[in-house]
Image (spheres, helix red, strand yellow):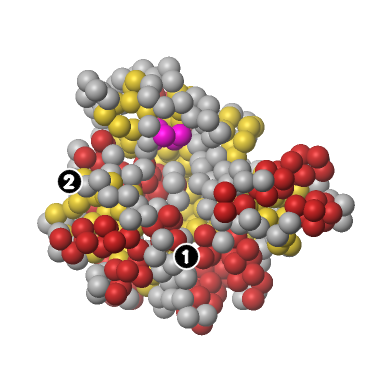
Amino acid sequence: MNILLVGSGGREHALAWKIAQSPLLTRMVCAPGNPGIAGLCETRDVAVRDVDGLTALASEIGADLVVVGPEASLEAGLADALERQSIACFGASARAARIETSKAFMKGFAERHGLPTAAFRVFESSGAARAHLDESEPPYVIKADGLTAGKGVTIAQTVPEAAAAIDACFTGRFGAAGARVIVEEHMSGEEVSLFALCDGERAMAFGAAQDHKRAFDGDRGPNTGGMGAFSPVPVFTAALEAEARRRLIEPAVRGLAAEGAPYRGALYAGLMLTAAGPRLVEFNARFGDPECQALMLRLESDILPYLLGAATGGLHRLPAPAWSRQTAICVVLAANGYPDDPQAGTAIVGAEADFGDDVVVFQAGTRRGDGGGLVAAGGRVLNVCARGETAAAAREAAYGAIARIDWPGGFYRRDIGARPPA
């Protein structure tokens, strides 16, 4: 099979790493890719929102399947353009991807289809949103409507803090993504990311992980796109997973099809495990980042049949994927100043060393410097991933590898996977 992989981050590096292991693979091209991905396949400098350029590239290489990593490509309509060219695509249409690209749409969709989620209100002006705070109880959850790379959510403990978050949205911090604001009920419990592959009609469970959103140890600091993840999640029992699939995943797939937007690709349900059972925090229309990195280390099945099955309606012909019983952990190394003002251009030494079979360093925001070495070129820069027979062994391997990387321009959390379940 000829594969076009779209994206340039750690998630895409992990997907490239796993796809490269498939005996079905003939050729893989990634656009735009990164230096780590370039070690696995050919890369082309085509931007993730360049729908015409990506569609032309898929035709040029005779792609049997296009695998879309980032949500930005879906929002831009890449899957729709590929469908018009009869090219199979693992990725949702722009209409289906609204479950991620518009939080207001997602909340309304959940309400229409009876999906358990937090109570909410949608506002189109700062004044109305701020007035609503007087009718609510803290903590206040403030969300920008559109795509913000995981940075558009504020959990505010006070009215002034919540009002500042609302004003930041409406005064342009997130551009058009902040033109509407959702104020919703705060939910308490353990957060879990549940993944499913969908082929327009059915869903197949595809692993779960727990993400660490806050920038600093102890869940302090601003929300980020994710500072680390681990899988499996002991607190997420088989019974809870079955309940989440029955009450959230399967109704969502049926609901999208009923609304004329059959969903194909990876469906990510961000869950809160509350006293009343799993409740929906958010849907994302792609694999999570950094959860995908941990999942790829645990996936024992060849991934390509599953990606193709989701794209072409063939999931019913496939067995459930096989997963390692090992624990996998992903620790994100981010540039100093992330998430607000990451410092680019700092040199990284040692990230491309051989760390052994159980450690993989995925590159997320890197480029080659003038001398050929790696330099930081993003907010989240490296993903140091490891697997082990226990969570402690996986953590030891990951943090041991980090100790061998010389990058004074970055920081990381030291408690990924260490907090005991609530």
Q: Residue at x 47, y 71 (%)?
A: 95
Q: Quadrant of residue 351?
A: top left
- Which region shows up in magenta? 378-383
Query: Between 20 and 105, which is closer to the camera in this rendering?
Result: 105
Number of numbered discs present?
2
Residue 249, compared with residue 326, is above or below; it is below
Check if residue 331 falls in the magenta segment. Answer: no
Q: Earlier in the sequence, mark 2 or mark 1?
A: 2
Q: Which residue is mark 1?
A: 97
Q: Position of residue 111 (x, y in %)?
A: 66, 72
Query: Between 212 and 257, which is closer to the camera in this rendering?
Result: 257
The residue furthest right is 134
Asked whether the viewer can see residue 24, the reply is no
Inter-mark Cα distance, 2 to 1: 28 Å
Q: Quadrant of residue 66?
A: bottom left
Position of the N terminus, as image quadrant, is bottom left
Q: Which residue is mark 2?
A: 42
Residue 109, compared with residue 37, is above or below; it is below
Q: Position of residue 409 (x, y in %)?
A: 44, 20
Amino acid found under the numbered disc labelled 2: Glu
Q: Residue at x 65, y 58 (%)?
A: 180
Q: Position of residue 215 (x, y in %)?
A: 57, 33
Q: Quadrant of residue 173?
A: top right
Q: Position of residue 146 (x, y in %)?
A: 56, 56
Q: Residues within 10 Å of mark 1 (few under 14, many from 20)?
A: many
Amino acid found under the numbered disc labelled 1: Ala
